[in-house]
């Protein structure tokens, strides 16, 4: 079974631009969560999508948004990029809250904002 | 919201020794506690998890203990090997029908020296 995939793997943007990251979960997984990883803040939860609905949201500004499609693939968007948005963005997929709870992480997208 | 503290931030042990990493959480309703290992440049991978209805769980050289009253849980690695060198993250989650939002500790850099 293929693992979680994320595209692109690396991205360089400038301040003020916007960016869209993509995540394809493991086949059969319906929940996709997004995390931001930085050396200073560690792993921080952004949001979770399940059956195309945002089910949980972390403490990030409205510039961070996401969506999920009917095939469970998910995208996250960051508008008006700031230098502080430079980070590794990880997505993780899991079955449902009623089954095994393990979240499987993708390789991440390394975003650099100049 | 949930807050997870993790100690120590760095840990250096000799090969063959044991390593212990400790975490405390703030939300008494949290009921799922996974531990992830992240090697340099790689994605976090689940190494063991425990639910709140269990006090201890073992998997070969790895064990996790949970004290719900004190709201802390620990990772124990015995007979450490060089390949155990990595960053370890604890996490806590209140799993409900509404999802599984992981709150991570700040990580422990474990170095196993020959």
Image: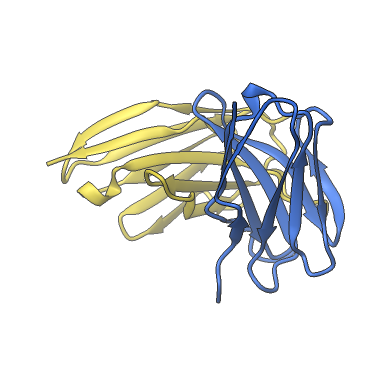
Colour seen for chain A: blue
* Visible residue check, residue B79: no
Q: Of all residues shown, which one is farthest toward the bottom?
A: A1
| Residue drawn 70% across the image and 73% down it | A28
Q: Nearer the viewer, residue A75 or B93?
A: A75
Observer able to see residue A59: yes
Examine the rendered structure and indicate whether residue B74 appears above or below residue B43: above
- Quadrant position of residue B13: top left
Q: Position of residue B111 (x, y in %)?
A: 26, 36
Residue at 37% from the left image edge and 43% from the top image edge = B40
Percent coordinates x, y for residue B53 in the rendering: 61, 52
- Using residue A33 as the reference point, say whether residue B86 is left or right of it: left
Is A112 located above or below residue B80 in the figure? above
Q: Quadrant of residue A84?
A: top right
Q: Residue at x 76, y 29 (%)?
A: A59
The mark tally for this picture is 0
**Quadrant including the N terminus of chain B:** top right
Pick the front one: A99 or A41: A41
Question: Which residue corresponds to the image point at 79% horizontal and 34% vertical from the top-left?
Answer: A79
Q: Whole-percent x and y of residue B84? A: 29, 48
- In this rendering, position of residue B44 left or right of residue A57: left
Residue A62 placed where, x, y %?
Answer: 84, 31
Q: Is residue B27 left or right of residue A80?
A: left
Does residue A42 appear left or right of residue B61 in this picture? right
In the rendered image of the structure, the colour used to display chain B is yellow
Comparing B29 with A60, the one in front is A60
- The extreme right residue here reads A53
């Amino acid at each position: 079974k293929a693992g979680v995939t994320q595209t692109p793997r690396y991205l360089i943007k400038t301040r003020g631009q916007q960016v869209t990251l993509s995540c394809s979960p493991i086949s059969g997984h319906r929940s996709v969560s997004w995390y931001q990883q930085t050396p200073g803040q560690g792993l921080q939860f952004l949001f979770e999508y399940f059956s195309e609905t945002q089910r949980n949201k972390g403490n990030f500004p409205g510039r961070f948004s996401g969506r999920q499609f009917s095939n469970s693939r998910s995208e996250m968007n960051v508008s008006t990029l700031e230098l502080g948005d430079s980070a590794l963005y990880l997505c993780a997929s899991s079955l449902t809250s009623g089954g095994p709870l393990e979240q499987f992480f993708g390789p991440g997208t390394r975003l650099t904002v100049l | 919201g949930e807050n997870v503290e993790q100690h120590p931030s760095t840990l250096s042990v000799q090969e063959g020794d044991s390593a212990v990493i400790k975490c405390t959480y703030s939300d008494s309703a949290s009921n799922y506690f996974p531990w992830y290992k992240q090697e340099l440049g790689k994605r976090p991978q689940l190494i063991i998890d425990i639910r709140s209805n269990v006090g201890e769980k073992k998997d070969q050289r790895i064990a996790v203990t949970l004290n719900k009253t004190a709201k802390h849980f620990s990772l124990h690695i015995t007979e450490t090997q060089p390949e155990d060198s990595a960053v370890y993250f604890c996490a806590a989650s209140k799993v409900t029908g509404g999802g599984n939002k992981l709150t991570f500790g700040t990580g422990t850099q474990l170095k196993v020296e020959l």
